[in-house]
Amino acid sequence: MTGLRRLGHPGSLISPTLETMSAVLADIEVIPLRIQLKPELPGAALWGGELTAADSLLVKVTTDDGIIGWGEAFGLYGTALAARALDELVAPLCLGRDAADIAALMDHVQRKLHVFGRGGAITYALSAVDIALWDIAGKRAGLPISTLLGGGDVRAMPCYASLACYTEPQRVRAAVRRVVDDGFTAIKLHESQLPAIQAARDEAGPAIALIVDAGCAWTLDHAQGLAADLHAVDMLFLEEPLWPPENFDGLAELRRSTGLPIASGENIGTTMEFERLLDAGAVDFAQPSPAKLGGITELRKVFALAAARDVAVMTHSFYDGPGLLAAIHTTAALGGAGAMIEWRWFDLEASIYGDALTTTAGRVTLPDGSGLGLDPDPDVIETYRFGV
């Protein structure tokens, strides 16, 4: 491990650098996956769009000495956009450059591409490369990423089951019953209608922690009008209640005027925006998304910003591959008491990691391997890969 600078305090912004074992980035391969949902729980949707399969965008990064790292860009309906951004814009700026100095490479790409926007598909693509480079750094050092980040002995993390949108109360009840029976003690709904939210609480019972993601559906006045009913549901937090999502002052006013616990951040593309969110007093929980924000390099900065303001971080990880593992490792290293992992519960035909990454009684165990700890199952890639 000669030359490894291990990160300690979450406020440190030094990227892992392996000066004596440097390699250049030789290949970047985009791997889109489409995995079907099982048919047992019909009616799944995402904000009005029928959901029969989940698209993911994996990225395989290889150095000139043969070390392979895996990353993930936020996909779903935007998988083709992120894939094109990576192929045409991000990858050409990365190939041939030092794979060890992650911070310098990420800064280089961001500066070159900032004219196209500081977020969206380009940042999703950059996130995937960043996560893959951290995977490579961990593999080269023989250490898990959580250790590179200064993590201690955390071996398992509590999860909440993050459901699709089912809208109809009976369908919501059926989904909630499935995840409670699976052992989860915390559930996130993607619902914006009170009957669906109330049905979830009725089915789950008072002992289950309930999170409501309203998907930026409401105005401030409308949300304030729902406050009494939402308090009665006894939520852990209310996520992204207002349109537009960057209405930080509105979130702050909703939080102040109603006392509802507010969470937001998955649609924020830069750390400066997170500073504005936090300084506005808008949230009880900050929600950076490693596959949307810029990978682990940017994610760890948000942990530091939130810690300085005594705000909890609850990462967004509405995906199933390396982005999920990035959230697990970073939260294990930098998250405080009460931090949980978002576990997307779509009841898919297959998992990107096969049976190697699962939950037991609502908890996920950190993989033992170096880097992210796991590589995607090659059989799953072969079966579910598709063209974009």
Image (cartoon, helix red, strand yellow):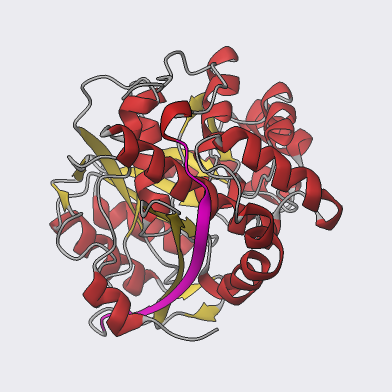
Which residue sits at x=79%, y=53%?
Answer: 113
Q: Is residue 377 left or right of residue 287?
A: left
Residue 227, percent from left and from top: 58, 41
Quadrant where the image shows the C terminus: bottom right
Identify which residue is drawn at 62% across, 49% down: 241
Residue 35 is inside the magenta segment: yes
| Residue situated furthest right in the rendering | 115
Q: Nearer the viewer, residue 276 or 106?
A: 106
Q: Relative to residue 343, is residue 299 drawn left or right?
A: right
User: Which quarter of the figure is the N terminus placed in?
Assistant: top left
* Above or below, 140 relative to 292: above
In terms of depth relative to the viewer, which is nearer, 40 or 13? 13
Residue 247 in view in this figure: yes
62 in the magenta segment = no
Picture coordinates of residue 190, whole percent (x, y): 47, 60
Q: Main secondary structure of the magenta part?
A: strand
Residue segment shown in magenta:
22-38
Label tally: 0
Residue found at x 14% / y 58%: 181
